[in-house]
Amino acid sequence: MRREFRQTGEARRYAGWMGALAALMLLLSGQAADAQQPPGSFADLVDKVAPAVVNISTTKEVRGGEAFPMPQFPPGSPFEEFFKEFFDRDRPQRPRRTFSLGSGFIIDPAGYVVTNNHVIADADEITVIMHDESEYKAEVVGRDTKTDLALLRIKRDEPFPFVEWADSDKVRVGDWMVAIGNPFGLGSSVTAGIVSARGRDIRAGPYDDFFQVDAAINRGNSGGPSFTLEGKVFAINTAIFSPSGGNVGIGFAIPSNLARPVIESLRRKGRVARAWLGVRIQSVTDEIAESLGLDAARGALVASVTPGGPAEKAGIEAGDVILEFDGKPIDKMRALPRIVASTEIGKKVTVVVWRRGKKVELTAVLGELPSDEELAQAEQGNGEGPTAIAEIPELGLKIASLHAELRSRFELGEDAKGVVVVDVDPGSSAAEEGLQPGDLIIEVNQEEVNSPPEMLARVNQAKQEGKKSVLLLVDRKGDLRFVALRFAE
């Protein structure tokens, strides 16, 4: 009985300790849960940041029929004459003004305002309307069409309220966020939600890396900020996905870490200076990866190299697959332009490429991205093979060597090289990949070909090695691209 009592006392003490431990764990877990929960109200956050969020009103003068262009008809059509007379008679002669509304935010007490470029594009006048409804005329400091960002400047004697940038790399999917903007011109409006996804590519530009958010974003929210719960800007609301044009819970915002260097460059120079490698690239498909002996479809396939550019000087060649750039892995093709553009101009970087079945490490010194006009140069080779013609039924192609008649028929220059496609089997892999008569095949499996016999030899070699496809470098009117064609079963 006494022994039983001792055991019971020990049990009670044990139970007491366990109860205290459980209570402590419950308290700690409750505190942790509270730290992850949204606040009972966003009011304090809004009071803190709303004065720095602005509405942007733009006006544009439209003359004559700019707003309502005349329909286009074939030359000589009777409708052309009728509508020309109608539009000339009824078209308003006096200029008219159109208005547009958007959002923005101040990042400096000196009055620098960030917004989207499309909000202020082609505007004759830009007015910034503050939270207290005071208005200021704005001047454009600079704009960048590739990221759809613009920097404005407003002035007054006293400093302006402003907000700070957040580190967007630390924002996680599922984090709470608050958006403030000017939807439908109603004035300052606040919405809240979570970060739905990151790394979205919506084909808006070469450096797409959008956050997807589910906070209500509508027309007029463009250029407005998305805030973390600490009241810092982690993204700029830019686009929505909506069949109706209204909010359906899918909005896209530019990350602050992408926007910030662009805005700083606009502020310093009035333009964006980006690093440049000097390559044209395309995605690596499963078929291309198999043709090159890659373990997976990854990296950026170099379709061509700009003569005299950093890539050519570094020894990068067409057909290389860039796997790493400056220590960063290139999992998808679209990641490379963004990483290059965000790297310092003049920096010496290591580039790892996949070339002929093995990794090759190269060193490149990045230049400054030239203008589009400076980059618009045709890249053509030289040489002409002997006259010959051949069929490759397993690919669905009929090819020929270059000669005067084919150059004239397909409008090929004297400096064109390779073999020319003269016919494509409609049910073949070549047809599925979009090859057409007049295309030039320059390389087969990264080896140059200048005649049909050379191409046949390369194709037969691939079949003997047990490959299921061949990789072709195709030139269509100066546009180079790689195409992987599977052999017919």
Image (tube, rainbow, N blue to C red):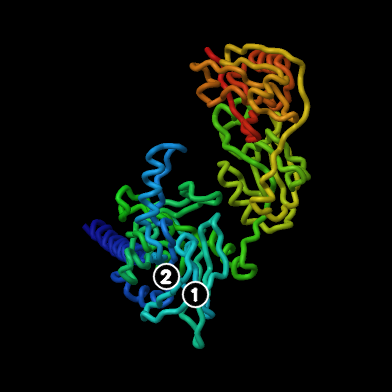
Quadrant of the rendered image containing residue 430: top right
Q: Which amino acid type is shown beneath numbered disc 2?
A: Ile
Q: Which mark is residue 56?
A: 2
Q: Secondary structure at mark 1?
A: loop
How packed is label 1: few (under 14 Cα within 10 Å), some, or many (20 or more)?
Answer: many
Q: Does 31 sit above or below residue 364?
A: below
Q: Secondary structure at mark 2?
A: strand
| 388 and 274: which is toward the camera | 388
| Residue occupying the far bottom of the picture | 157
Q: Is residue 419 above or below residue 477?
A: above
Query: Residue 310 location, x and y as percent?
Result: 74, 48
Which quadrant of the figure has residue 460? top right
* Pointer 1 residue: 138
| Pointers 1 and 2 in contact (C-beta within 8 Å) | yes
Real-space Cα distance between discs 1 and 2?
9 Å
- Which quarter of the rendered picture does the N terminus lie within? bottom left
Q: Amino acid at mark 1?
A: Ala
Where is residue 393 drawn, in percent x and y? 58, 11
Mark closest to the chain's N terminus, 1 or 2: 2
Q: Is residue 128 left or right of residue 338?
A: left
Q: Nearer the viewer, residue 172 or 372?
A: 372
**Residue 416 in the image: above or below residue 457:** below
Does any portion of residue 17 appear in the rendered image? no
> In the rendering, which numbered label is found on residue 338?
none
* Residue 206 place in picture, x, y as percent: 55, 49
Residue at the spot 43% in from the left edge and 75% down from the top edge:
52
Residue pictured at 43% horizontal, 56% vertical? 66
